[in-house]
Image: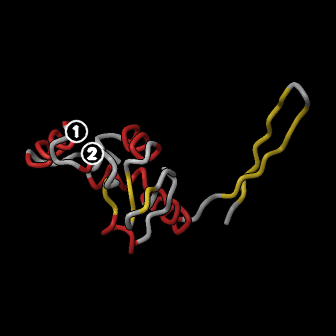
Amino acid sequence: MTEYEEVRVLSTGVYRVRYKKLTPGQIKALRTRAQRRLQTYIVRRGLAKSFFQARQLIAHGHISIAGRKVTAPSYHVRIDDEETLDYASSSPYASKDYPLSRAMAVEEAAGGVKVEW
């Protein structure tokens, strides 16, 4: 692993900052971890139209995993949890008659939600 150094001049003095270059394996691990975040996973599954909307749904308690509400967007979704991820039973989004649920169903039928990575 190679290191490189950057010199920063601030009003309080000169600082040297050292960085380590990431290996391809480390970069892949970071990408994988980012894709396992609950917020990202909800958008990829089509439960939300955007990352902002996914964050709002999570923070307001509309998402559950294995019947338990999860309110942390940074929650790491395990492989076992993937099948049990859905809207919370107390959430209005769980109803097929809710306007957003209907809009998402129409969009899914028309070709699905496309997310740019």
Q: Which residue is more in the foreground, 62 or 50?
A: 62
Residues marked 2 and 1 touching at CB (< 8 Å)? yes
- Which residue corresponds to mark 1? 100
Badge 1, how many Cα within 10 Å: few under 14, some, many 20+? some
Q: Position of residue 115 (x, y in %)?
A: 29, 46
Most distant residue in the top direction = 11
Colour convention = secondary structure
Q: How many marks?
A: 2
Q: Which residue shows up at 39% across the image and 58% down it?
A: 64
Left or right of residue 74, residue 44 in this image: left
Residue placed most toward the observer, 6 or 64? 64
Q: What kind of residue is marked 2?
A: Tyr
* Residue topped by disc 2: 93
Q: Residue at x 67, y 66 (%)?
A: 1
Circle 2: is it few (<14), some (14-19), or many (20+) Cα within 10 Å? many
Res. 9 image quadrant: top right
Query: How far across and how far down the image is residue 7, in percent?
Result: 80, 39
- Which is more foreground, mark 2 or mark 1? 2
For the point 37% across and 39% down, which residue is it? 53
